[in-house]
Amino acid sequence: MGNPVLRKIAEAVTPGQIQTEEFQRFCDDLLESMYEQDGAGLAAPQVHESVRVVVFELDEESGPIFLVNPVVTPVGEETGFGYEGCLSVPELRGRVRRWLHVRVEALHRDGTPIEFEAHGWAARVVQHECDHLDGVLYVDRAEPRSLAFLKEYRRYGPPVLGDEGDEGDDGEE
């Protein structure tokens, strides 16, 4: 947090860029960086590239999912709270309200269109990563009184803020 690239609106990737060896190598490097950092996802600005690309992996069975130039649209009006962390803001957790159901339209890393709906934790991961493409960090959305250092979060649990339940996971995103 503090690097200007994390606060910029990332540039769209052109169809011509997608087909280049350089872009494909970047996607491989982005995925490798996510794995090395034990993240659930990673956005290009987090590795100092201001382009509209994210990768995430919800489970080993489905494997990594790349989104190029994603558009995320809420489905319905239901939201929920969950605690989030971020590789760009290490050792901190915060309670964030997110849409519980979203529709995603993007391109795969090979340029083919992809459309899907995500619910619950998957919707949270997608929104978190795509926020990076617009220069938004989860701490911008977090309830200020919910912020806790990871050491204390693990020791004492999330701060008690009221009677609303949390639906999230405390994993790094």
Image: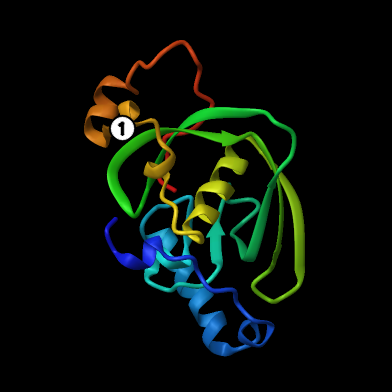
Residue 50: image quadrant is bottom left
Compared to residue 2, the image places residue 92 above or below, namely above
**Residue lying farthest to the top in this orientation:** 163
Q: Is residue 88 left or right of residue 136?
A: left
Q: Is residue 29 left or right of residue 76?
A: left
Q: Residue at label 1?
A: 147
Q: Is residue 77 left or right of residue 168?
A: right
Compared to residue 31, the image places residue 13 above or below, namely below
Residue 6 can be seen in this image? yes
Q: How is the image coloured?
A: rainbow
Residue drawn at 61 percent across, 29 percent down: 79
The image shows residue 49 at horizontal and vertical percentages of: 43, 74
Viewer-proximal residue among 116 and 138: 138
SS at mark 1 in the image:
loop
The image shows residue 167 at horizontal and vertical percentages of: 54, 26
Residue drawn at 43 percent across, 59 percent down: 35
Residue 88: image quadrant is bottom left
Q: Name the image quarter holding the N terminus.
A: bottom left
**Total marks placed:** 1
Q: Is residue 46 left or right of residue 80?
A: left
Residue drawn at 35 percent across, 16 percent down: 160
Compared to residue 59, the image places residue 26 above or below, namely below
The image shows residue 8 at horizontal and vertical percentages of: 43, 65
Residue drawn at 60 percent across, 77 percent down: 13
Compared to residue 134, the image places residue 125 above or below, namely above
What amino acid type should be assigned to the residue bearing mark 1? Leu
Viewer-proximal residue among 34 and 62: 34
Residue 161: image quadrant is top left
The image shows residue 63 at horizontal and vertical percentages of: 61, 57
Mark 1 surroundings within 10 Å by alpha-carbon count, few (fewer than 14), some (14 through 19), many (20 or more): many
Viewer-proximal residue among 48 and 122: 48
Residue 59 can be seen in this image? no
